[in-house]
Amino acid sequence: MENTFPKDFVFGTATAAYQIEGAVNEDGRCPSIWDTFSHTPGATFAGDTGDVATDSYHRWREDLALLNDLGVDAYRFSIAMPRIMPTPNGIPNAKGLDFYERIVDTLLEYGIKPVVTLYHWDLPQYLEDAGGWLNRVTSYALGDYAAVVAKRLGDRVDTWTTLNEPWCASYLSYGAKEQAPGLGLGPGAFPAVHHLNLAHGLMVQAVRGIVGDKSKYSVTLNMPFNRGDADACHRLDLIANRAFLDPMLRGRYPDELFAITKGICDWSFIQPGDLENAHQPIDLLGVHYYSTNRVAMSDRPQFPQETGPSTCPGASDIDWLPTDGPHTDMGWNIDPQGLYDTLMRVHDRYPEVDLVITENGMACRDQLVVNEDGTKAVHDADRIDYLERHFAAAKRALDDGVPLSGYFVWSLLDNFEWYFGYAKRFGITYVDYATQERTKKDSFLWYRDFIASRG
Ligand code: FCB
């Protein structure tokens, strides 16, 4: 595939701390909600945990060398709050800061821009014990933590991303039981939605107060693009997308969101000043895109009944219909046009902010092949095809006027895929979990050549 993206387009890959680091008991790190959740019997596939993951806390040099071989412009990784603020006393852990400083400095030596996610779901357990995202104190704790990180790394980080997928961090985690802490509270997740929005704004303010406008600011969301019944799509758009984007980018919640949640949520947890705090100028909006949903209004009994693990509270009167194939190993449909449509729609609604694809990729049943000469390979032609078609869709959106500045492939490495543990492989690098040996898949080599052929 010819690479016709502009010269300054940012190509990258992404990872997240709990999915790769391991070393959960080292150098003063405290437990996070994901340690607790993954150690709860039955909570994850095969009882997998992130205790070791890809051991990147120890193998970070090797992993960053892979990035250098790949030739990316930027690397999106997350900082683990449990390594930085391991106790409620507010005293930062120097060893945690040192670890991320080594990563940032090595990236800069390679000429790779550090794109830091401050919160990719690994909330310290002590904050959860005090109510977690249901308690507004958590939002302020995140702001304080962001300031600590900014003081140490602020002069070297290219882009600060406050939150990763607040939809998952609230609805899937507090509304349903699919992700940590897995409380299954249904509409009880709405306070978490609001406190995440507040935390976003407090983090932007905290970092900007130290770094000013030398860095870029962003937040990154999965914005489920739905096909099907217009009412169901509209309702899900309010709950899944606008419940976050409107407060963050416009300083208000949509009136219709209040209307459709009447009787199940009174929104009294919104305090004076919260929306002003949540609404901070940002430079980039990160879009995660993997697949699309097909939905219809349901004729089943309505809320507050819980209908399944992926149900959004307030959306339980929506049916999730089977999608047309082909599907990935996650069971997600492959729909590159959905990426184009998502980018166009988001830009149309929020034209004031530039877009970047902060996650896109595919889980495959990868097979490690040992060649006659002893070298190893993974022939993941399906992943290459997926990436080619999604890059083409992104380029079309760019040509059609979307201010799209970058694309981060999920993920640099196979890793701990949350509920699915090690059963799903998204990496462009294969990880043999028994030995931690890394093998570049064909998609890695394809992406390397694609980046190099730009312009
Ligand atoms: C996203 C997460 C990321 C990864 C991909 C497959 O929801 O942000 O950590 O698990 O899905």
Image (spheres, rainbow, N blue to C red):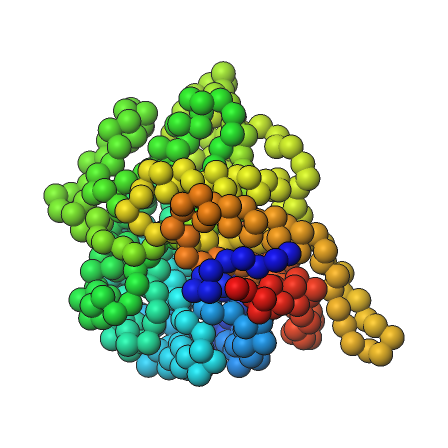
Q: Quadrant of residue 174?
A: top left
How far from the left and from the top, in percent, is residue 226?
A: 49, 33
Give left or right: position of 340 versus 191. right
Write the residue at 42% across / 22% down: 231
Write the residue at 45% across / 74% down: 112
Give left or right: position of 385 versus 353. right
**Residue found farthest to the left:** 272
Write the residue at 84% across / 79% down: 373
Q: Quadrant of the N terminus?
A: bottom right
**Residue found farthest to the right:** 372
Camera-side residue of 451 and 297: 451
Q: Quadrant of residue 212?
A: bottom left
**Residue found farthest to the top:** 299
Camera-side residue of 355 and 186: 355
> Is residue 112 at all visible to an observer of this figure?
yes
On screen, 261 above or below 413? Answer: above
On screen, 59 above or below 269? Answer: below
Camera-side residue of 310 and 295: 295
On screen, 206 above or below 182? Answer: below
How far from the left and from the top, in percent, is residue 337?
A: 55, 39
> Is residue 416 at all visible to an observer of this figure?
no
Write the residue at 35% across / 60% down: 161
Give left or right: position of 277 versus 4. left
